Image: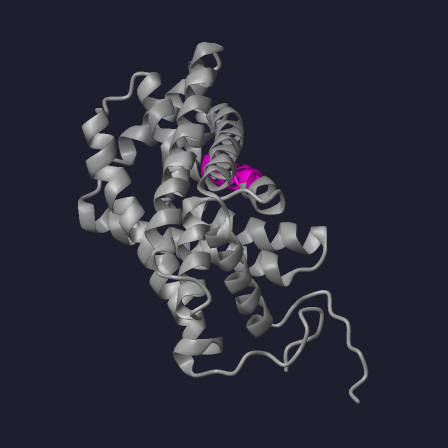
Amino acid sequence: NMPEVMAMVKGPKEAYEGMVDKGVELAAKPLIKVFHQSFFAGCYIGFGGMLSMVVAGGLADAAEANPTIQTFVFAALFPVNLLIILLSGGILYTGTSATVAAAVYERKTHWVNIPRTFVVAWMGNFLGALIFALLIEYCDMNEALTAQLAVKVAEKKIKADFLKTTIKGVGCNWMVCMAVFLCGQAQDMTGKMVGIWFPISAFVAIGFEHIPANMFMIPLGMLAGADVSVLDMLVKNFLPTTLGNTIAGSLIVAGGYSFAFGRLGCNNPSPLPVDRISR
């Protein structure tokens, strides 16, 4: 018999199988629970987004000389929302697009659970983020330098054409899903935090498009007076961003790692329990 080997980090194959199991669990949840955890996740997106807006917004003068400072601070603070969401069982549309799709690829859940969970997660995220933005506005917290940055962000997010925004959505959710993947690999709190922080801060600093974040950022900017209509928000950002996020999660990450470690690549399941190092 092989001696028991304990690991602080799962191997990539076991991490992918954990992702599949997460998708199976999510697909089996009652829709009311999917909505509940998605709504909470939308609120947490608001917490992280508002933290970044307040602190980075206060660096407006420094940003005139060096815009990278504001970008770095915004990106460094934003991942607090993903830390809370992933470590408390929250549901984001972005991660759902990978986990449920992976479960379908491995034939562990029916394909009908893709539209079922995707739609409910999207709506829950949107309502949570929107209500959070409305409460921030009601409490007079969306003003001065914070409001200036919110307007700037919202207006920028509707400037690119449909294809460019879609591609930005692909880049974003590739990183977000890798944060989910790395979080699943790590077996301690510190490791999970590091695994989440780097990919999330990377996509924010680069300027990619994340639909749950935009569900908070754009309404916040609109409430502050941004020249953005509801139609602009939906057609010029929400639609292409959602499309790009879905392509990255369901095809690139779920499909790519199913090919690498799962059924699409004709791979055998790992013979090792989840606490063992991957061969």
The relative height of residue 56 versus residue 267 in the rendered view (above or below) is above
Image quarter (top left, top right, bottom left or bottom right) of the C terminus = bottom right
Pick whichever, 260 or 155, lies toward us: 260
Pick whichever, 215 or 117, lies toward us: 117
Residue drawn at x 41%, y 18% as measured from the top left: 134
| One can see residue 208 in this view | no
Residue at far bottom of view? 1
Residue drawn at x 53%, y 27% as measured from the top left: 55
The spot of residue 226 in percent (x, y) is 28, 21
| One can see residue 95 in this view | yes
Q: Main secondary structure of the magenta part?
A: helix
Q: Is residue 72 magenta?
A: yes
The spot of residue 72 in percent (x, y) is 50, 41
The relative height of residue 188 versus residue 18 in the rendered view (above or below) is above
The relative height of residue 38 versus residue 132 in the rendered view (above or below) is below
What is the span of residues highlighted in magenta in the rendered image? 70-81
The spot of residue 63 in percent (x, y) is 44, 31
Residue 126 found in image quarter: top left
Image quarter (top left, top right, bottom left or bottom right) of the N terminus = bottom right
The spot of residue 201 in percent (x, y) is 50, 47
Q: Is residue 12 magenta?
A: no
Residue 230 found in image quarter: top left
Q: Count how many numbered circles sit on residues in the image.
A: 0
Residue drawn at x 39%, y 54% as measured from the top left: 97
Pick whichever, 51 or 259, lies toward us: 259
Residue drawn at x 57%, y 64% as measured from the top left: 18
